[in-house]
Image (spheres, helix red, strand yellow):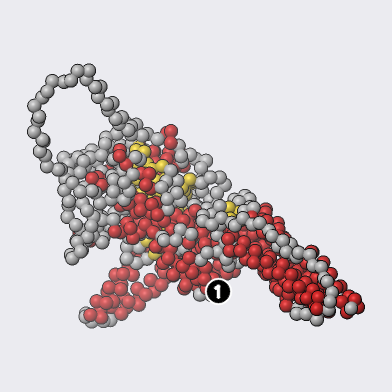
Amino acid sequence: MAGETAGLEEALSCVVRLAGDHISALDSTMRHMAAHAWVGGGAVPFTQAAHDQRTRLQRAFETAAAQIAERIRALGGHPTTPPLSTPLPVATSTRGGYAGMNVEAMTRMVADLERAGHELPTAGSQLSAALASACVSAAPAQQVAGVGAWATGQATDLRRRLTVLQQRPDGDMANAAVLGFGLFGGSAPDPGGLGTMLATAANGDPSILEKVVAAQNTGKDPTLASRVSAWWQMLDPAARQRLIDAAPQLIGSLDGIPAATRDSANRAYLGLRRSAIAERLAELRTLEEHMKRGARQSYIRMEINALEAEQRQISAVEKSLAMGGMNGRPPALLLHFELGGLGKAAISFGDPDKAGSVVTSVPGTGSRLEGIGGDAARAATLWDQANVSSPHTKTASIIWLGYEAPQLDPGILWADTSVASPNLAQAGAGSLASFLDGLHATHRPAGTPRFTVLGHSYGSVVTGIAAQTRKGAFADQLILVGSPGTMAARASDLGVKQVWVGESPQDPIADLGHLPISGGRNPISGILSPWIPNGAGPFGTDPSNIAFGANRFVVDPTPAGFTGYDIGAHSGYWARRSASLRNMGFIINGQYDDVSKLPTPKQAPPPTPHLTPPPPSRPAPDPVSQPSTTPQPSPMPTGD
């Protein structure tokens, strides 16, 4: 009997010895995750996968030992098998928002995975030999080798991704973009199938990026730009260049792509469109000359007019870009470029990815790509003033015309396109929110950056709606000038640290917030709903109203006509050497003590109670007055 079981006892001892050496191969990985070396994004599914593989490893050794022990008992022996698995308390990585990653700890964890990947296949071969000698199934040995293969795969992928993290200037804690969605892309959450789409684009189908751009313009996914940033960082340089060459307009439109890359792609697209338009126009003009008047000729003329409009848009963008590098300004970057219709663009004076202060200006009514030169000049002037106020601060000043602004044309009567309706602002707010998501995702600061969004006129309505979709994550502060409203009742509803309001007493557009217009749409005609006596304004509380709760800064008054208003005041906030421009420069740089503020009127003290009752008086009749629909002028400044 002893002779029959001796070989089995030796095989069992071999299994127990191998188990003692290797059942803890993944324990250090579990301890690192329990200590929150990585929290957020793909951390939760990675932790679960590691836990499952550790369980699979230990059960493989338990099964191997149990098979041999069963044979020994069948022969009348009494095998002794020690426990081959041990519980390992694990705190599940936090779900919810991004918390952080300790790159040093993760590097140690990857080294442990590499060691497990190297040792477990060898252990599997030894286990297979022991099981064969005992004439039992070798399946447990294959499971051990499989865990080793998993560890090798994870270590290889994580090592490559960690290399990217260690090249960042963020220190030991990686930023949300790469952490949450780049470090463990296979397990990270993938709302909307974005990861699949990006992988498809990287594998040779860049047209799929049209769906990504469409998704970002809705602004519904606040993580989208971060995931795009992570995806782009994980691509090798050759793959990036292939995508830029194949679809420059799409790469240039993606929020989450570095600013310098977007500029390069958009300039390439601009050049391609300029050449293609010139060539097509030459063909059309030749056709038009040889064709008799008629329907066919009218179609040709329509296409010629549309292409000539695009030429004017290109010219306006090129002239705006030329403002960069002048008067000490940094070069201009083209962060977005879209031809046709009213057109869209975003131009930055300075690299927002490297700036310590980033201000994004959102223009209002009447803005269109063909006239972007005026808006770009304001952004350049804002950079100039911020540089004067704090010459050692690296500033980026962006003009963002990424939405269709209302125009002063017959469309003003229609609720869908009227300046007195929030519809166009609601349609554009998602794009603005996504654009700011992208600025945050690609920013590589030397210190703590300051993000400011400046909304002018109708642009402040867009800004207010976008801020409310990203409370606490949109910007550090808002500046509202000539603002009719933000679709918020109070400044605190906007979810930023500070809100600053500048309003000329003679600005008629800013006082639209006082008008009792519903801003609604007639369900039959589509025309803007009529005025409603004593109704609320169309854009929420007027930001210049003390009840709104914003900080108010001084704006120089201008001469006004008999109405008390001057339409020129609406565009005068950027006037050279003006109080408003100086104040905006101080706010952008966080120099709040230097801002000329409008005082907040103190509330009158409560009346002192009479020691003796006052003599009775006859009741006066209730006053009768009609509500005024005339906008009330903004408060006059008390001075610099």
- Amino acid type of the residue tagged 1 in the rendering: Asn
Q: Residue at x 75, y 65 (%)?
A: 84
Q: How many marks?
A: 1
On the question of residue 480 being in view, the answer is: yes
The N terminus appears in which quarter of the rendering?
Answer: bottom right
Q: Is residue 603 left or right of residue 334?
A: left
Report x, y in % for residue 162. 64, 59
- Could you say which is closer to the camera, residue 374 or residue 110? 110
Report x, y in % for residue 435. 44, 57
On the question of residue 572 being in view, the answer is: no
Vertical relation: 178 (above or below) 196: above
Q: Residue at x 71, y 58 (%)?
A: 28
Q: Residue at x 45, y 46 (%)?
A: 476
- Could you say which is closer to the camera, residue 321 or residue 27? 27
Q: Is residue 40 left or right of residue 475?
A: right
Report x, y in % for residue 613. 18, 20
- For disc 1, the neighbor class at 10 Å (few under 14, some 14 to 19, many from 20) is few
Report x, y in % for residue 554. 33, 36
Q: Which residue is mark 1?
A: 203
- Could you say which is closer to the camera, residue 119 or residue 502? 119
Q: Residue at x 42, y 53 (%)?
A: 470
Q: In terms of secondary structure, where does tag 1 sit?
A: loop
Residue located farthest toward the top when viewing the structure as drawn: 611
The C terminus appears in which quarter of the rendering?
Answer: top left
